[in-house]
Amino acid sequence: MNANMKEKLTILIAALFITLTAKGQNLFFIGENSFSCTKTITLQSNTNDVSDLNVLFAKDGKIGLFAIIAESSIGSKFSEKLIIYLENGTVISCTQRRSSDLVENMAKAVYSLTSDQLNKMKNSNIHSVRYTLELRTAEGHLVGEISRTASNKGAPTKTLVTDFFNE
């Protein structure tokens, strides 16, 4: 094998390694857990003075997860229920919140998705998401709730879901 061939082979191997490494570096951290995930999609808030909602899809083994992040300057966390509206009219209620956290004024939550819910999201893009932030005392008593919605402005979520969960 000549020097030119060795150089090309080395470059090819390095390119493959970088591609594989970059693909595996998307991680979502919450509490003491980390999950492999898709890139973040930003859904536009439907209220002018409220920050947008960031969403991503993650995996815990074979279990699909829906993760959300929103600014929370009032110290609130996401509630137990999340509603995802798809463009084809399907409504997905997520009631299995796995984890919720508040760090540096950013509320985070992870919801488990059933295989049926994942299949529905593989067939239609997200139209909007409805979520509730709960304000609690230091002792854990609920003192108020804020319901909000955020809309997808063209992100191809069904492609993202299909590609990520069919790997």
Image (cartoon, rainbow, N blue to C red):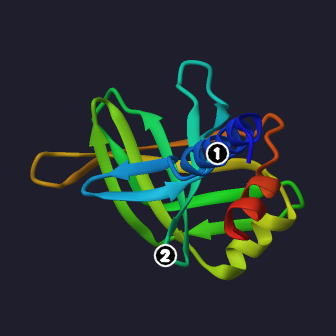
Callout 2 environment at 10 Å: few (<14), some (14 to 19), or many (20+)? few
The residue most toward the left is 139
Give the residue at mark 1: 19
164 displayed left or right of 102: right
Front residue of this view, candidates 76 and 120 = 120
Front residue of this view, candidates 149 and 142 = 149
Give the residue at mark 2: 61
Q: Amino acid at mark 1?
A: Thr
Front residue of this view, candidates 33 and 154 = 33
136 displayed left or right of 22: left
Local secondary structure at mark 2: loop
Residue occupying the point 64% across, 35% down: 42
Would you identify the image quadrant in which residue 167 lies?
A: bottom right
User: Of label 2 and label 1, which has the lower sequence position?
Assistant: 1
Q: Position of residue 142 (x, y in %)?
A: 25, 53
Question: Compared with residue 52, is residue 13 higher up or lower down, i.e. above or below?
Answer: below
Tell me the CA gap for discs 2 and 1.
Answer: 22 Å
